[in-house]
Amino acid sequence: MLFKAGKYLNNAELDKIMKSNVHFRALRSACAQQTLHRVVESFKSYKALKKLYTKGQLTDKPRVPKYRKKGGLAVVSYPARWVKLVKGQLKFTLGKQVKVWFGIDHFLLPMPSNIDFKSIKEYRFVPRNGCFYLEFVYERPKPKPVTPTENVL
């Protein structure tokens, strides 16, 4: 809409437009919302940088957020609450439309043993080099600062 009407869209407006898109509807609703949120945040950032540039507070002209290439794939994020741990496997549910098209409603991936399942906040499927990589977003506990007990001045 920015290029056609010169208007920035918010999450609700973009969601309303995309609800009729068959590819958007094929995604799990939480994943689709995450994707839209990422697009809106990118354009908000661009708008703020553009404003700073016109005021002269920024030296380099900001660029419009990049789109994926035609035929390319985008990152898909799953919030942790939509992923279940079943017998040591991560269960990712798929949208209803995918079940109609392909006859599958979920897929399983092995859970890494070095990460606590409860600490994971988000899962990201990242397409790169012809493969999909699963990224785990989690909070690491803050390390306690080491205070020397001896040889203190």
Image (spheres, grey):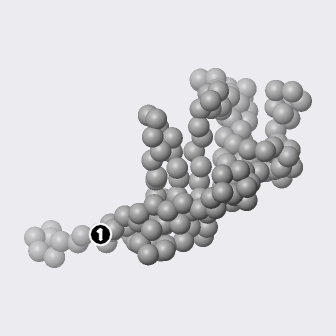
- The quarter of the displayed image where residue 131 is located: top left
Residue plotted at (59% across, 24% down) = 59
Left or right side of 142 for 128: right
* Image location (x, y in percent) of residue 41: 68, 45
Left or right side of 7 for 140: left
Residue plotted at (64% across, 61% down) = 105
Left or right side of 150 for 33: right
- The quarter of the displayed image where residue 2 is located: top right
Residue plotted at (47% across, 44% down) = 132
Residue underneath mark 1: 145
Q: Nearer the viewer, residue 116 or 85?
A: 85
- The quarter of the displayed image where residue 39 is located: top right
**Badge 1, how many Cα within 10 Å: few under 14, some, many 20+?**
few
- Count all numbered tags in the image, as a single digit: 1
Residue type beneath disc 1: Pro
Q: Nearer the viewer, residue 13 or 62?
A: 13
Asked if residue 111 shows in the view, the reply is yes
* Image location (x, y in percent) of residue 71: 62, 29
Extreme right residue here?
5
* Image location (x, y in percent) of residue 53: 68, 27
Asked if residue 58 shows in the view, the reply is no
Q: Quadrant of the N terminus?
A: top right
Q: Quadrant of the C terminus?
A: bottom left
Q: Nearer the viewer, residue 30 or 96?
A: 96
Q: Secondary structure at mark 1?
A: loop
Residue plotted at (53% across, 53% down) = 124
